[in-house]
Amino acid sequence: MAGDGRAPAEGTPPGAQRTGGPVPLRVLSYNVHELADDTAALARVLLAAAPDVVCLQEAPTRLLTASRLQDLAAATGLWVCAAGRAGAGAALLVSGRVDVRDAQVRALPVPLLRRGVPVRRRGWAEALVRVLGPQGWSQPVGVRSVHLGLDPAERLDHCWRLAAQDDTGSSLLATAGERVVVAGDLNEEPDGAAQRFLRSRLTDPLGEAPRPATFSARRPRRRIDAVLLGPGLAVADAGEVAAAEADLVVASDHRPVRVDLLVPAAG
């Protein structure tokens, strides 16, 4: 587990009931391009989105740049709950409404070279979280951020490995049961083999439509970023982020995906 050392919240707040209606949870998936673009605009996009959990891809992991992720979190009122070199740029940020029960980053296998060209490392970041509502805590939700590769066979292999982790119960997400979110830059459109594999197990709240497109940020024509859900979660809304267009264009080379969930209350 990698994070900022924040102690998880415990118990139920004074005056809050232990059971109640569904608890809202806003999830964002965002490839932030190594924070190499306009980070002030990126911070404004995150502030406008007001997420509870942000699934990042291409977060900086190099020794001299990794601290920039903490700077972004601090500028947006969020906390880094999972990040590190093993995740190969996959990371998770959370708001103060979220209690992180466990978190980790994991590497996915890639060759050193493909056709003589160095291959980018791949991995995922995941956390088991619960979110605070007016009447108390939600049930646990497993959230995983992943960045799939450019090679179709590699993408499909990594999807099999992601699914195997859940099927064997060796992943901390198994604690969440059907309340699972898998989000990230999948590097292919909804009709690709890897996306079809994931959609055989998970639901896309945006359906099969090509819009809203997420890449490129300046001329969005391809929907290669997604937030996919297990059957234990209800969707209140999903779509684009209500941020300034000028900021979305320069914040990263991707656009974010937003999903507003309703999570069953604890108890």
Image: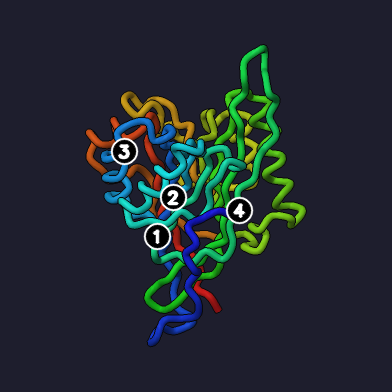
Q: Is residue 203 visible?
A: no
Q: CA distance from mark 2 to mark 3?
A: 16 Å
Quarter of the image for residue 216 reads top left
Q: Is residue 224 above or below residue 151?
A: below
What residue did someone put label 3 on? Answer: 39
Q: Residue at x 58, y 41 (%)?
A: 85
For the residue marked with disc 4, what is the amino acid? Answer: Gln
Residue 64 place in picture, x, y as percent = 46, 37
Disc 3 versus disc 4: distance between alpha carbons? 25 Å
Q: Please tell me whether residue 169 is drawn above or below residue 28 in the rendered image.
A: below
Q: Nearer the viewer, mark 3 or mark 1?
A: 3
Q: Nearer the viewer, residue 237 or 55?
A: 55
Q: How many neighbours does mark 1 have within 10 angstroms: few (below 14), some (14-19), or many (20 or more)? A: many
Mark identifier at residue 95: 1
Report if residue 222 is visible in the image. yes
Amino acid type at image mark 2: Val
Q: Say the numbered circle drawn on residue 54.
A: 2
Give the distance between the C-alpha atoms of the residues marked 3 and 1, in whole angstroms: 19 Å
Q: Secondary structure at mark 3?
A: helix
Residue linked to disc 4: 104
Number of callouts = 4
Residue drawn at (41%, 79%), measured in percent from left and top? 135
- Label 2: element kind: strand
- Mark closest to the chain's N terminus, 1 or 2: 2
Secondary structure, mark 1, is: loop
Quadrant in which the N terminus appears? bottom right
Q: Amino acid at mark 3?
A: Thr
Q: Which comes sooner in the sequence, label 3 or label 1?
A: 3
Residue at figure coordinates x 57%, y 61% from the top left = 128
